[in-house]
Image: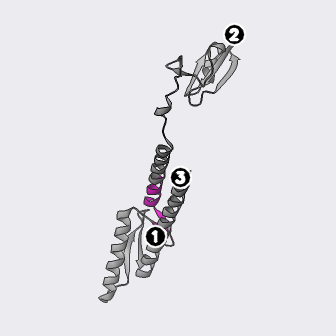
Amino acid sequence: MSQLFAIYRLSDGAIRTGHGADPELQVQPGEALFSDPSSVTDPRTQRVVDGEVVSIVQPAAESLPTLADLKAIKWAVIKAQRDAAISAPKLTSFGLFDAKPADQDNLNKVIALTALAIAHGQADEARYTLATNERVTLTLAQLQLAALEIGAQTQAVYETASTIRAQIESA
């Protein structure tokens, strides 16, 4: 036997209606089923909580976030994305390098030690472990170029974040 029903999407209040013998089969996660479509009212003023329709009371104006609050929230999100991008592995001409600040410090130490070894008449190359755990042998010049490539990519992330910050502040 076919029955008329309504499905209410909790995320945005969208309502779709239908008919069929098994409306439960059409309900997706995050949706609520109403056997009587007329019982679902304006989704802007009502929501479903534990299967029951409840009225929504609009918050008082003083409890709404200010523009400064919204800017601060957006900047915090951008900073978190920036920091994640800075710490993400970086692809260089010599492979994929770890790029967290500690990893960049380690690369700089390897460069300094390789330069010191050369100054004392030793080999001009060093073994280095890439982000893929591959061990490679790189010359001092290659290590320096990899560090420059990582630095350029990191600087590009900072520049992008700075541009976005300026856009947030001008809003």
Q: Say which element carries label 3.
A: helix
Residue under numbered circle 3: 168
- Of the numbered discs 2 and 3, the one sitting upstream in the chain is 2
Q: Position of residue 56 (x, y in %)?
A: 53, 22
- Identity of the amino acid at label 2? Met
What residue lies at 59% left-to-right and 30% top-to-bottom? Answer: 12
Quarter of the view holding residue 40: top right
The residue positioned farthest toward the top in the image shown:
1
Q: CA distance from mark 1 to mark 2?
A: 68 Å
Q: CA distance from mark 1 to mark 3?
A: 26 Å
How packed is label 2: few (under 14 Cα within 10 Å), some, or many (20 or more)?
few
From mark 2 to mark 3, how far is it between C-alphas?
56 Å
Tag 3: residue type? Ile
On the image, numbered disc 1 is attached to which residue? 151
> Residue beneath label 2, please?
1
- Residue at point 31%, 83% (across, down): 116
Q: Which residues are magenta?
A: 81-96
> Taking 142 as reference, is 16 left or right?
right
Of residues 123 and 40, which is closer to you in this image?
40
Q: Nearer the viewer, mark 1 or mark 2?
A: 1
Q: Secondary structure at mark 2?
A: loop
* Front of the two marks 1 and 3: 3
**Whether residue 116 is situated above or below residue 160 in the rendered picture:** below
Q: Are marks 1 and 2 in contact (CB under 8 Å)?
A: no
Location of residue 24 (image quadrant) = top right
Q: Please, what is the three-letter code of the amino acid marked with disc 1?
A: Gly
Callout 1 secondary element: helix
Which residue: 48% across, 67% down? 155
Of mark 1 and mark 3, the one earlier in the sequence is 1
Question: Is 5 colored magenta in this rendering?
Answer: no
